[in-house]
């Protein structure tokens, strides 16, 4: 044997690519998976007997705003529960932001996430503010945590690109400072024309600086909000689909079926990625409805049935838009199961993939992700026998292995009966 095994996981069942394996031994040397087989006759510095527990590639948080996490109630509560009141409250909270404030809250949130098996995170950083404090803060966090969690930063113009002077230039400045992804918010530009123009500008910037794209798109119940078709058209013309993500797209849930059917064909051609944030959009949307009240989510099940890549995000942890949030991606998958009626056997499994492998595809992680020999040793042991049981029991992440090292482990709560019943 030409390598020393540092960590040996014994008899874990791997859930990946929609398949559950027989119990396997997984040998890790340094930061790399070196061998996977039913039985490995090896000694290792550390051995973890798993007794059939589930091993999955790490959870991927494909959409969160780490600049605003843990600010719920500051400076005031969101009484209407709408996206737009949230944006106003955040505008007020932004006045007192410092780089240290962002670093502290973002790292606290990343620890909460990692302890529950999240090892890859795409965060939005608001670039509406002239000081670019959220971007500076989150770029420094990306660097500070890189030995245990991978963070991608989206330059996100929360207040719109053309509605305030200077944002166009700041978005380009963000590329020069090293943001990984260009963002936008076409449905919040002052006019439809500005929205269309903003999408084209985002694609131009991404091409010039060789970056990914993730646009907050059509996050409104307005059935006339139709920037998704503009994104699809640009992705088709520039052949960039797999590098492009449309986040939220909640208006897709309100489009008439004739338009939605036509659009779905264009989306299949464009092959862009989608992120749905069911926790947040179930609470933000439908606020102007009486009854029946819309769910305000994009067409998750139909996008999945059409073979498109859909991942699920948390979006917020305790901020002006959503005062709850645990960082646990099984919570998000469970909410999608309910709100999108994904209760079939394969649909349940798909919801777990939407917070693991599909998220990896959204983030363009390619070969940096997945359990196989020669791959970076990032994986999570869940206290469950298969993916559906993980949802049923909201399984505890027993062991989180990051870059070959045990990072954090959790012991499930112990229940002790005081009477025999
Ligand atoms: N900003 C936005 O435009 N939409 C959201 N859902 C959040 C922030 C959380
Ligand atoms: Fe968002």
Image (tube, rainbow, N blue to C red):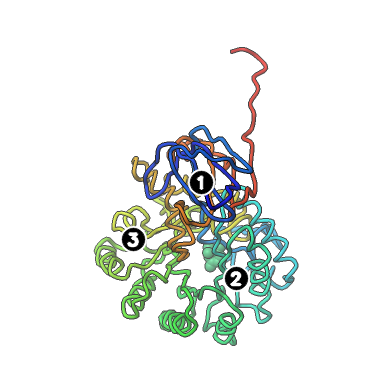
Task: Describe the element under mark 1 as helix, strand or loop.
Answer: helix
Q: What's the mark number on residue 356?
A: none
Q: Earlier in the sequence, mark 2 or mark 3?
A: 2
Residue 350 visible in the picture? yes
Q: Nearer the viewer, residue 303 or 414?
A: 414
Q: Position of residue 20 (x, y in %)?
A: 39, 41
Q: Nearer the viewer, residue 212 or 292?
A: 212
Q: Is mark 1 within 8 Å of ligand 2?
A: no
Circles 2, 1 touching at the beta carbon (< 8 Å) = no
Q: CA distance from mark 2 to mark 1?
A: 24 Å
Q: CA distance from mark 2 to mark 3?
A: 26 Å
Give the residue pinned by disc 3.
308
Q: Position of residue 138 (x, y in %)?
A: 64, 69
Q: Is mark 3 within 8 Å of ligand 2?
A: no
Relative horizontal placement of residue 406, taking residue 237 as reference (left or right):
right
**Dividing the image into 4 quarters, which one contains the C terminus?**
top right
Classify 10 Å Cα crowding around label 3: few (below 14), some (14-19), many (20 and above).
many
Q: CA distance from mark 1 to mark 3?
A: 21 Å
Q: Position of residue 344 (x, y in %)?
A: 34, 41
Q: Earlier in the sequence, mark 1 or mark 3?
A: 3
Q: Residue at x 66, y 53 (%)?
A: 111
Residue 91 versus residue 22 in the image, above or below? below
Q: Residue at x 59, y 87 (%)?
A: 165
Residue 171 versus residue 93 in the image, above or below? below
Q: Earlier in the sequence, mark 2 or mark 1?
A: 2
Q: Position of residue 5 (x, y in %)?
A: 57, 47
Relative horizontal placement of residue 261, taking residue 235 as reference (left or right):
left
Give the residue pinned by disc 2.
125
């Amino acid at each position: 044997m030409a390598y020393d095994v540092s960590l040996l996981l014994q008899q874990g069942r791997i859930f990946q690519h929609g398949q559950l394996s027989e119990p396997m031994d997984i040998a890790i040397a340094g930061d790399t998976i070196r061998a996977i087989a039913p039985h490995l006759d090896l000694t290792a510095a550390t051995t973890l007997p798993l007794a059939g527990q589930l091993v999955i590639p790490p959870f991927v948080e494909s959409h969160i705003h780490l600049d605003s996490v843990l600010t719920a109630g500051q400076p005031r509560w969101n009484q209407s529960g709408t996206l737009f009141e949230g944006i106003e409250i955040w505008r007020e909270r932004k006045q007192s932001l410092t780089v240290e404030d962002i670093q502290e809250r973002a790292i606290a949130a990343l620890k909460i996430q990692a302890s529950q098996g999240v090892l890859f995170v795409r965060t939005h950083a608001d670039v509406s503010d002239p000081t670019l404090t959220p971007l500076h803060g989150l770029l420094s966090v990306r660097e500070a945590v890189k030995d245990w969690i991978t963070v991608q930063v989206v330059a996100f113009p929360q207040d719109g690109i053309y509605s305030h002077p200077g944002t166009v230039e700041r978005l380009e400045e963000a590329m020069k400072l090293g943001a990984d992804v260009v963002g936008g918010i076409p449905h919040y530009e002052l006019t439809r024309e500005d929205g269309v123009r903003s999408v084209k500008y985002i694609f131009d910037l991404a091409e010039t600086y060789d970056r990914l794209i993730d646009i907050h798109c059509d996050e409104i119940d307005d059935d006339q909000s139709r920037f998704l078709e503009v994104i699809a058209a640009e992705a088709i013309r520039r052949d960039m689909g797999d590098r492009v993500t449309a986040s939220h797209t909640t208006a897709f849930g309100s489009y008439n079926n004739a338009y939605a059917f036509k659009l779905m064909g264009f989306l299949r051609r464009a092959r862009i990625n989608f992120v749905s944030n069911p926790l947040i959009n179930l609470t933000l949307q439908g606020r102007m409805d009486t009854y029946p009240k819309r769910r305000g989510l994009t067409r998750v099940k139909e996008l999945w049935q059409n073979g498109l890549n859909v991942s699920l995000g948390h979006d917020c942890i305790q901020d002006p838009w959503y005062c709850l949030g645990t960082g646990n991606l099984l919570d998000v998958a469970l909410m999608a199961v309910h709100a999108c009626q994904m209760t079939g056997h394969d649909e349940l499994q798909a919801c777990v993939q939407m917070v693991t492998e599909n998220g990896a595809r959204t983030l363009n992680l390619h070969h940096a992700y997945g359990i196989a020999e020669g791959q970076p040793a990032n994986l999570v042991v869940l206290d469950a026998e298969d993916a559906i049981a993980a949802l049923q029991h909201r399984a505890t992440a027993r062991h989180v292995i990051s870059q070959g090292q045990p990072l954090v482990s959790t012991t499930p709560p112990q229940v002790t009966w005081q009477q025999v019943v």
